[in-house]
Amino acid sequence: MKKNIKTYLGIFLSVLLLGLPVQAEGEPEDLYARSAVLMDADTGRILFEKNGSEQMPMASTTKIMTLLVTLENADLEGTVQVSAYAASMPKVRLNLQEGETYRLKDLCYSLMLESHNDSAVAIAEHVGGSVEGFASMMNQKARDLGCYHSYFITPNGLDAEDEYGKHSITAKDLARIMRCCMQNEEFLSITRQPSWSFSSLDGSRSFTVNNKNAFLNMMEGALTGKTGFTNGAGYCYVGALEREGKRLIAVVLACGWPNNRTWKWSDTKKLMSYGIENFHKKTVGEEKLELEPVRILDGQTASVRASADVRTEQVLLKEGDTFQMDVLKPDALPAPVQKGELVGTVIYYLNGEIFDLFPIYIEDDSLMIDYEWCLEQIVCRWIPDGPGL
């Protein structure tokens, strides 16, 4: 039984970390991107993928992780001092100068609205102590989100490689990171701002940065997103949209090189339109599940109760999608068993693929039959009033 429990837990983790794709007719065709994903942001379910598990460079889409780590670990009112290294970053740049000081929040707008590489490094050095320290924080956050096929070296997404690998990600992992970003109101506020004006803290220089995310004005319900381009990555984009009760994330990687700047928008709109037009919210699962008791072999009780905290879930389904529930629970267990012991799993399937799992627990204790228990039963049965009478 312990082996089976480990199997259930392994299945559970694989579902959470991998995100199984949906196979369906009428999927988007002729995408320019070498790798693409469409995700249901509410459940994390992959609705469509094209090479979604292939690890690739992601250019400045990296900066959604840079902002997320910053928001979770730093005070936006903090003071950032620009280092010589930060000031040396190549275009696109704010043209920061060594020794200047800025409010962290202002540099976050520079980072996301115009994708300034020097601002990214200044932020990383402030939050992580160094670029290497900040990259470690980014990689830890990726692991926390189940992104095990991502590797961050730089905070700005410039092509990079070290002894452990290349700065890279999968489309699935980038969608998972964006899903987390969408839950952060400050992230949404910064990335949706049309423009932002600020000055260095000594007032000697002033700037206005304008939002370069054209997708915000391309489709109704566009929420947030980030572009990217390097020679190694090509044109990349990750964006989110909310419409008709659906929250969708689209990712395109290696979506053309110069002169194909518009291909990322074409692919993103095609993915989003596919999700809006073909998927509709449906309620699946059970609110409450009554399970048969589990018989106990050689136990002081004949059986124990079992329960699973199942729930109904709203998921995006398209025509032809199917739902199934399976209960994996033993009919009997050897004593002893303890309340709270994991003994099985309830599995939800969509289109034959595991979608969610719920553990089944024992609700009662049952000790093994022993000499003292047998003696007590004899006494209770044949001498009802107990000893001493």
Image (tube, rainbow, N blue to C red):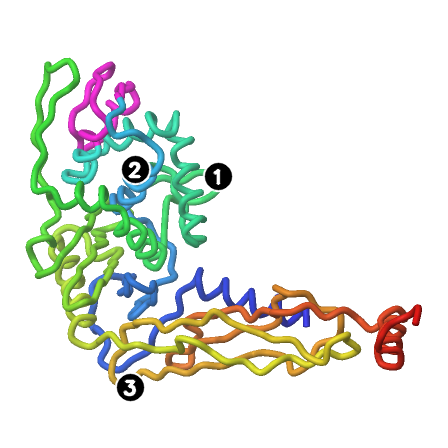
Judging by the rendered image, the residue that carries numbered circle 3 is: 320
Disc 2, disc 1: CB below 8 Å?
no
Residue type at numbered disc 3? Gly
User: Element type at marker 3?
Assistant: loop
Residue type at tag 1:
Glu
Q: Is residue 106 magenta?
A: yes
Q: CA distance from mark 2 to mark 3?
A: 41 Å
Tell me if mark 3 has few (under 14), some (14-19) or many (20+) residues whose alpha carbon lies within 10 angstroms of its own.
Answer: few
The nearer-to-camera label among 2 and 3 is: 2
From the image, tell me which residue sits under label 1.
163
Looking at the image, which residue is at 27% across and 45% down?
64
Verify whether residue 220 appears in magenta.
Answer: no
Instruction: Mark 3 and mark 1 in contact? Answer it, CB < 8 Å.
Output: no
Quarter of the picture containing the C terminus is bottom right
Q: Can you tell which quarter of the image residue 1 is in?
A: bottom right
Q: Which mark is residue 51?
A: none
Indicate which label's residue lies in the foreground, 3 or 1.
3
**Along the line of sight, which residue is nearer the eye, 103 or 60?**
103
User: In percent of the image, x 48 and y 39: which residue is there?
Assistant: 163
Q: How far is the residue under mark 3 from the one under mark 1?
A: 47 Å
Q: Nearer the viewer, mark 2 or mark 1?
A: 2
- 247 above or below 122? below
C-alpha span from label 2 to label 1: 29 Å
Q: Are marks 2 and 3 in contact (CB under 8 Å)?
A: no
Q: Which residues are magenta?
A: 79-107
Q: Identify which residue is drawn at 85% across, 74% down.
A: 385
Q: Residue 132's spot in the image, x, y percent? A: 41, 31
Q: Earlier in the sequence, mark 2 or mark 1?
A: 2
